[in-house]
Image (tube, rainbow, N blue to C red):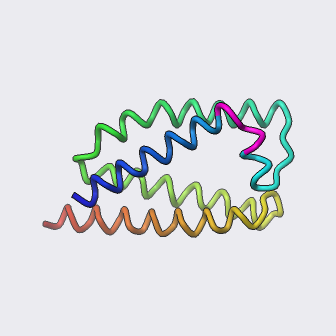
Amino acid sequence: MLHKLITTITAGLIAVSAVAELLFPSKLLEFVGITSNAQLDFLLRTTGVALIALVPSLWFAQDNAHALLGIAVYMFLSSAVDFQAFIQGIVNLWSVLSIVIRVIWGMSSLWLMLRRITK
């Protein structure tokens, strides 16, 4: 049941993030230290649309432990992109907290998936 909780929370967080990307892209960019412009807002809104489109699939995959693999991959890859941006001075220190949380979330997702599959 814990895998279902992780999947549900992740779907909810991605949905909230995606809606924020659609409605307030410049505020999200400002939070991590990036100066917004029309092109960046457009790109962030496009990402928001893609994430919203994926949320229903994640929601309906709650009972499938393999959905946790997708969550882990997303958490690890998005953290790697943010870490590279931090090293290059593109984003501020708030991104590091986000990176740490997503890596822990990804590791927990993998652990739960492996635990469920090996039962």
Left or right of 71: which side holds 30? right
**Magenta segment, prevailing SS (helix, strand or loop):** helix
Taking the spot 57% from the left edge, 69% from the top edge, the residue there is 100
Give the farthest residue toward the left. 119
The picture quadrant where one finds residue 89 is bottom right
Q: Which quadrant: the C terminus? A: bottom left
Taking the spot 57% from the left edge, 30% from the top edge, the residue there is 49
Q: Is residue 33 above or below residue 93?
A: above
The picture quadrant where one finds residue 99 is bottom right
Please provide percent x and percent y for residue 55. Answer: 43, 37
Left or right of 61: which side holds 9? right
Please provide percent x and percent y for residue 82. Answer: 67, 59
Taking the spot 38% from the left edge, 33% from the top edge, the residue there is 56
Please provide percent x and percent y for residue 20. Answer: 63, 38
Q: Is residue 97 above or below residue 14?
A: below
Q: Which quadrant: the N terminus? A: bottom left
Left or right of 103: which side holds 57? left
Q: Is residue 30 above or below residue 40?
A: below
Please provide percent x and percent y for residue 73. Answer: 46, 55
Left or right of 28: which side holds 116? left
Q: Tell me the magenta residue range.
A: 22-27
The reply to whether the magenta stretch includes residue 25 is: yes
The reply to whether the magenta stretch includes residue 34 is: no
Taking the spot 78% from the left edge, 39% from the top edge, the residue there is 26
The picture quadrant where one finds residue 83 is bottom right
